[in-house]
Amino acid sequence: MYNLLKGKKGIIFGALDSNSLAWKVAERAHQEGAQIVLTNAPVAMRLGAINELGQKINAPIIPADATNNEDLNNLINKATEHFGSKIDFVLHSIGMSINVRKSRHYTDLKHDDFLKAMDISALSFHRTMQSLYNLDAMANEGSIVALSYIAAQRTFPGYSDMADNKSALESIARSFGYYYGKKSQVRVNTISQSPTKTTAGSGIKGFNAFYNYAEKISPLGNANADEFADYCLTLFSDLTKKVTMQNLFHDGGFSFTGVSEEVMEFFMDKE
Ligand code: NAI
């Protein structure tokens, strides 16, 4: 351990069970000396295992639906009260699409469900930052991170409306990052993570194909959840103070590899 986050205080959204990317970040941030408040949607309190994590890392859990401004204001007020100070870092690790869950084809999406998914997966990031900003809850030089996927830039059949949600999420990071940087040197970034076996990940039709294909293309192989947590901590630490408004690929090199020898071999003898 490096004591990278010693004395820092953060809110972590989205730890559902021990596979969740947010769960790993919470555990690692705690190991690195951070104090944490955990949050998730009220329904996740019943379905998931977040209480177990709360006990393990001595973190209070404050439920909040990330599409509800009142819930977000309440969460942020309670968190600053609990910490007795402003917040140094926030992880937004939230995603959900009913169209994806129901495997609806992209050309036949239900638009009410599309709007809901956009609100949960992208606009909630704006809502969260707006609450933090208006309540003046972020410490100077704080750091805010959300989770994205390369379907924001390139088409992956089956990822459906989540691709559009991720594009919006990345754009919100840039737009809010500008204003938050000006206000109080707060940086805002998204991390674009390899396919990872979690509840949200495995809910995508064809997830195994995405996962195995990326594993074969990426020179370093897919990044797993523990490696994600390590990378995320660097963005919360004081070592990355001038990194902002970026979408940072944490994908073993997948995003910049055209083809790998393994995939070439597979096609070599085909006429
Ligand atoms: P997960 O299913 O463990 O986490 C998703 C979380 O979103 C859950 O904790 C869920 O309760 C929360 N959530 C859903 N609706 C909410 C609401 N209204 N308010 C508050 N929270 C709500 O799965 P995972 O994979 O850890 O997902 C976290 C993030 O990582 C998501 O943004 C996902 O799109 C992103 N991601 C996942 C990848 C993967 O392959 N697993 C790859 C790249 C990005």
Image (spheres, rainbow, N blue to C red):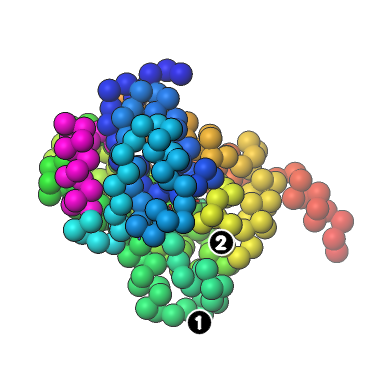
Residue for point 21% across, 32% down: 83
Decide whether the magenta segment is chiefly helix, strand or loop: helix
- Looking at the rendering, the stretch of residues picked out in magenta corresponds to 72-90
Asked if residue 61 can be seen in this view, the reply is: yes
Is 255 on the left-hand or right-hand side of 165? right
Image position, residue 236 (x, y; %): 34, 32
Q: Which residue is identified by label 1? A: 108
> Which residue, given by chain and number where applicable, does mark 2 sit on?
203
Mark 2 vs 1, N-terminal side: 1
Residue 182 is one of the magenta-drawn residues: no
Quadrant in which residue 34 is drawn:
top left
Q: Residue at x 51, y 68 (%)?
A: 100
Amino acid on which disc 2 is placed: Gly
Query: Secondary structure beneath disc 1?
Result: helix
Whether the residue under disc 2 has CB within 8 Å of ligand 1 = yes
Q: Position of residue 188 (x, y in %)?
A: 29, 43
Tell me if mark 2 has few (under 14), some (14-19) or many (20+) residues whose alpha carbon lies within 10 angstroms of its own: some
